[in-house]
Image (cartoon, coloured by chain):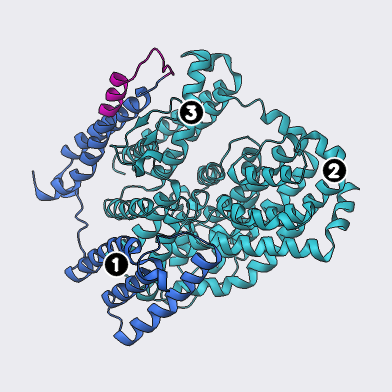
Chain colours: A blue, B cyan
Amino acid sequence: MNQKKLYILFGPLAFLVLGLISAIDGIRIIKSSDTQSVYQALGPGGYIIIVGLALMGCSLLYIFFLLNRNASAVVDRSAANREQKSLMLKLILAMAIYIISIDLIGFAWATFCFFLIIFKSMQVSWQKTVIMSIIFTIPLRVIFLDWLSISFPKGFFDLYF
Amino acid sequence: MDLINGIVNVFTVSNLLYCFVGCVLGTVVGVLPGLGPASSLSILLPLTVYLDPTGSIIMLAGLYYGTMYGGSTTSILLNIPGEAASVPTTFDGFQMTKMGRAGEALWIAAVGSFIAGTVGSIGLCIIGPGIAKYALKFGPPEYFGLLFFSFTMLISLSGRRIIKGAMTGLLGISLASFGIDPLTGMARLNFSLIGLMRGFDIVPVVVGLFGIGEIIFTAEQGIQQIYHGKLGKMMPVGKELRKGLNASLRGTLIGFLLGLLPGMIAALSSFMAYDCEKRISKYPEKFGTGVIEGVAAPEAANNATAQAGFIPLMALGIPTGPSLAIILAALMMYGLQPGPILFQQNTQFIWAVIASMYIGNIILLILNLPLIGVWARISLVPYKYLAPIVLAICVIGAYSPRNTLFDVWVALLFGILGFLMRKGEWPLAPLILGFILGPMFEQALRQSLSMGGYFFFLFRPITLTFIILTMIVLFLFIKYLRAIPKAN
């Protein structure tokens, strides 16, 4: 089996695993529940078993199709260059850091730092990065925290800002 | 005559001001992802305590349909639907933006919403109270039939990728079942994670799949700007205008009729309107590439559903969704009991509110049309400036419905999933459709089975009709597949 096929098999295999998890959890629920006291048609657990089995069935069907398909028909879409891939990974990493830092240093400071990281990743000059980070952070704080009163975690720094 | 009296009553400076404030706030909130009508109404509700009942309800109603109206803007410009009902608008709306036709898409969305709002208001006056009684005949088996039929939409939303569409649809249904069993209250598929106990909320899922997924995909593809070049027309003309307006009318009809059903969500009507347009179109293969009907129909349906929801609310006291439940709470706060008596005892109030809907729709149109040129320019902003602000708004949008950072992680994970699905050419729409319909379908199916056993549908004519319709659609689809030459 060539590498291209292995790459595209990853998707249906993930679906297959999810279907399996759903079915197993359904069986676990049925085994652990007292069906005398908790009776419901297709429940508890019956419905997710059916959904899980259907998902597994479709996944197996698709895998069967893929395995019988001509290798040349498999399109390789991993055409992005290294720089673009690195930017994509930086974005994901920056978002993960942003979510963690909201809890630690509060919304406003975390947002400011997030903008600094992202603008710099996008190769914006330092001067522009700092100015734009400030310009974007202030309205977000005013609109969402002050005006709409969304209660973000109050981190260490937000107590003083 | 009552309506004319209502219009006269609304034309006080204070009532017009309340209507205007409601519409403006609704439009602003609608543009922000995550802040749907229910959360914005709950924010505003305590503030209306100090107003008179008519002014208060006029303001809340303005906010409600203003939010539905404003939701299209980010869907069209940035591919970020603020709520599930705006998802179908992204399919063609964002493609139009990529082609420099953002102005046309925004224009038809605004006018389509206006048509839907106005027709909805007229329906509320004329046929509303009569039709609302029939909507009550819809029990769990009838809902099951309707939802069963709705799943045929997977066919048109998947295009040629039928198995992939079925798989992503089932994935959506499966993801929607995480959390708690709705009928027995037992925990399922939560892997002992506290955050998963309530399941996945629709907003982080949508914001992640569409908003974050799009930005990651754009970064990976090295795209610098949504659109390069000179912006096109700011309004459709000639044939395009005619097609857009006709689609708006059809979407309005679908949205209005579905909006009368208690428990109906605007997302289903906008998906159905999109699907209907695709089915009757002479060029269904072009849907998803920037077709004006693909924007007009779901936007009109979405707004018509919002407007029609006032009929069961006012005539029978049944809110068709969480937003209208808040308006019901406001009515009761003022000692007004919705139902047939409301029409008899509070004639002045009820007709003033209905009249304010006409005026609200005109205000929304006046407010939105001049802004189209400004909004459309967003498509010219380079991604390196646009992406950070979009991602930050996505984070806020994912966080705000339930105020938990767990949902932001969910949005990020769905963002990565959305990116991978785009890369592998897996259709996103069936996943969202499955996610939206899954819980409703499960509830209707299990309740129907409990009520009438495994052959419950044989004794319910409406359910049976929907099942037969589904079979006909599937039969026609198989026939269509066989008709395609193998080479294609």
Q: Which residue is mark 2?
A: B346
B22 above or below B380? above
Report whether residue B395 is seen.
yes
Q: Secondary structure beneath disc 1?
A: helix
B32 above or below B149? below
Q: Please report, as a chain letter, where disc 3 is located.
A: B
The answer to if A40 sits in the magenta stretch is yes
Which residue type does callout 1 highlight?
Ala
- In front of the other: label 3 or label 2? 2
Residue A69 location in percent, x, y?
18, 40
Crowdedness near tag 2: few (<14), some (14–19) or many (≥20) residues, C-alpha within 10 Å:
some
**Side of B176 relative to B110 (left or right):** left
Write down the region rendered in magenta: A23-41
Lower sequence index among marks 1 and 3: 1
In front here: A47 or B375? A47
Q: Which residue is mark 3?
A: B443
Residue B473's disc is: none
Q: Which residue is mark 1?
A: B219
Residue at image location 87% in from the left, 39% down from the top: B345
Residue at image location 21% in from the left, 52% down from the top: A75
